[in-house]
Image (cartoon, rainbow, N blue to C red):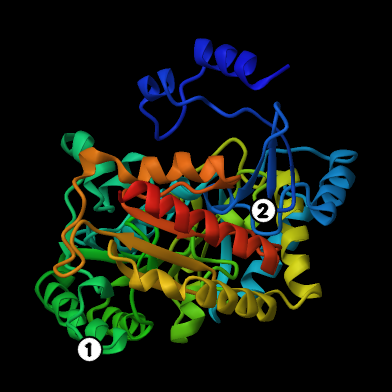
Amino acid sequence: MNNHALSQRDLAVLWHPCSQMKDHETLPLIPIRRGQGVWLEDFDGNRYLDAISSWWVNIFGHANPTINAAIKVQLETLEHVILAGFTHEAAISLAEKLTAITPAGLNRCFYADNGSSAIEVALKMSFHYWLNTGLPQKTKFITLENSYHGETLGALAVGNVSLYKQTYQPLLMDVITVPGPDCYFREPGESWQAYSERRFALMEQALAMHAGQVCAVIIEPLVQCAGSMRMYDAVYLKLLRAACDRYQVHLIADEIAVGFGRTGSLFACDQAGITPDFMCLSKGLTGGYLPLSAVLTTDRVYQAFYDDYAKLTAFLHSHSYTGNALACRAALATLGIFENQPVLENNRQLATLMQQATAHFADHPHVAEVRQTGMILAIELVKNKADKEPFPWQERRGLKAYQHGLKQGVLLRPLGNVIYFMPPYVINPEEIQLMVNAAWSAIAEATQ
């Protein structure tokens, strides 16, 4: 088997995600034969450094021996069982660990299959809570501009990236969208904290005006990942938590992409010292091995559904693979690595190396900003540095960077005109330098 033969078989039957399939008439698919650590190898023997953790899921490397071993043991006893009326040890142990390590007060764990499904659960659960507690008029959600929460209809509705949302707008519920704290737009000399505080006034106004009909505010803590990796200060989260309490509105923290060490702390909410009413987790939860998501919530929310069956207050939401045993075991092994190794400490050192290695990017005539939160670093390419005029999206500069990166043996998948690094935590200094060098030459290629 080789790359060409497999790609031809693929194109005859497969429809790929987030892709214009016609591109593959000239942009060859890359069939991957194996993965090891931060590396992927195709069927022609080419190797690629996975600088984006395979869509942000793979945090401890491909073919991680610890996670491999845990799944193999689980596979010999139980692969899956219905979680309605039945349970199993892996699901219980994982829920125990998640309620222990997430912010204080998140004492209940509800499983789903993927990130979008977790968002759907949180939205429905918030609405249903207010219904069960005698406030059926609370049916709206507040979201931030440039936000992204997934691509099922509920998750898409509370997002605000037009590329994904615009086509399906007629199918979506109405939401209240508030200008965000994206620090890319701060004034010269203005700090992230000062800008984030200033922008919060717009959220305060929306809550003051609409709180009586709002179920929840949903937010990506610290980094709007699919929204071009835009970032803001943790003070915004502190102010938002306090405001949600004042106005009796839930706070949903979408930590699907930023959880499990990505931002420098185990969870992004930790940096603000807050507890949301709902925390959605997925992606890194299983170390990138199997689909699984979890919604953590409070005893107060749980009790609003706890009653005699005849009252019809139960949360009747389900997925066939809820709490899958293999996925739960992969997640337990992933959490075990955090427990047994100084992951966050090591990540801080790696983040510093990434920062140092990319410091010179800020001087590039087509780089408007290099920004970083923990193990997420983004480089914003622009046509005109003086006024941050973007390159026209039709020019697909990011695609040029992607293609050049592959030639350098690095998987970069830019978000429009933003090149970013979100590598597995097992990356080493030499691999960081390789990744950075490839990005530098890719920027030169994309901006010429």
Kind of residue at disc 1: Gly
Front one among 190 and 163: 190
Q: Which mark is residue 8?
A: none
Foreground mark, 1 or 2, reads 1
Q: Taking 315 as reference, is 375 left or right? A: right
Q: Quadrant of residue 107?
A: bottom right
- Residue found 66% across the figure and 60% down from its top: 431
Q: Quadrant of residue 199?
A: bottom left
Front one among 198 and 62: 62
Dot 1 crowding, Cα within 10 Å, few <14, some 14–19, many 20+: few
Q: How far across and down, in percent of the image, does residue 350 sit?
A: 63, 74
Total marks in image: 2
Q: Secondary structure at mark 2?
A: helix
Q: Secondary structure at mark 1?
A: loop
Q: Taking 125 as reference, is 5 left or right? A: right
- The answer to the question of whether label 1 and label 2 lie on touching residues, with beta carbons closer than 8 A, is no
Front one among 251 and 1: 1
Q: Which mark is residue 286?
A: 2
Kind of residue at disc 2: Thr
Q: Taking 175 as reference, is 444 left or right? A: right
| 198 versus 165 height, above or below | below
Query: CA gap, disc 1 to disc 2?
Result: 41 Å
- Residue found 54% across the figure and 41% down from its top: 406
Q: Where is mark 1, residue-wise?
A: 189
Circle nearer the N terminus (1, 2): 1
